[in-house]
Amino acid sequence: MNCALCQKYLEAWLAGTLPDHLKIQVEDHLSVCPQCRKTADVLKISETLIAGEKETEPNPFLATRIMAAIEANESRIELSKPGFVRLLRPAVIALSMATAVFAGIALGRLSGSSSAINEIPMELVLINDAQMEAIGPLSNE
Ligand SMILES: [Zn+2]
């Protein structure tokens, strides 16, 4: 048996699923080849580690502990800020909103012609409430 063939069968040999004639050949090769023996050792260790990982049960309090740590971290950050920064935040938000509103108005004025705003359309002039006939007398009939 050569090294490539031996390493191909190593996993099955470790799992104990190799047929007897192949098992003997692999063990014979391992007894003479330090390279493959080393590979087998590494494989054995990694499989032991993986098996240990699989057996690890999730800690039921892990989520609680993580959330507590996050909250502690957040409150620490909040406390580390100077007081005026905390007071300033709403003011900055209000200021930026006001700026956005005024920018919107300015953009609206830029896009439409400014004279059109001051002119009243003919349709609106014709629909003048003051000149309209009262509907009250008609409803009494
Ligand atoms: Zn070998």
Image (tube, rainbow, N blue to C red):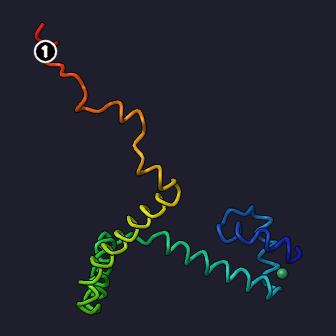
Q: Which residue in the structure is indicated by mark 1?
A: 137
x then y, percent, for residue 115? 47, 53
Image quadrant in which you'd find residue 82: bottom left
Number of numbered discs on residues: 1
Relative vertical location of residue 132 with respect to residue 137 in this rendering, above or below: below
Q: Identify the residue shown where x is 61% and y is 81%.
A: 45
Above or below, 17 against 123 in this view is below
Classify the position of the C terminus by image quarter.
top left
Query: Is 140 or 76 nearer to us in this picture?
Result: 140
Q: Position of residue 32 (x, y in %)?
A: 83, 86
Q: Is residue 56 above or below residue 32?
A: above
In the image shown, does 99 or 43 lie closer to the viewer?
Answer: 99
Image coordinates for residue 28, horizontal then vertical, percent: 81, 78
Q: Secondary structure at mark 1?
A: helix
Q: Is residue 42 left or right of residue 52?
A: right
Label 1 Cα crowd, 10 Å radius (few <14 / some 14-19 / many 20+): few
Which residue appears farthest toward the right when viewing the image?
Answer: 2
Q: Quadrant of residue 132?
A: top left
Q: Quadrant of residue 125?
A: top left
- Which amino acid does the dot numbered 1 rest on? Pro
Residue positioned most to the front: 131
Q: Residue furthest left?
A: 140
Q: Residue at x 22, y 22 (%)?
A: 133
- Ligand 1 within 8 Å of disc 1? The answer is no
Where the N terminus falls, by quadrant?
Answer: bottom right
Ligand 1 resides in the quarter of the picture at: bottom right
Which residue is located at x 75 percent, y 64 percent? 20
> x%, y% of residue 114?
47, 56
Front position in the image: 46 or 30: 46
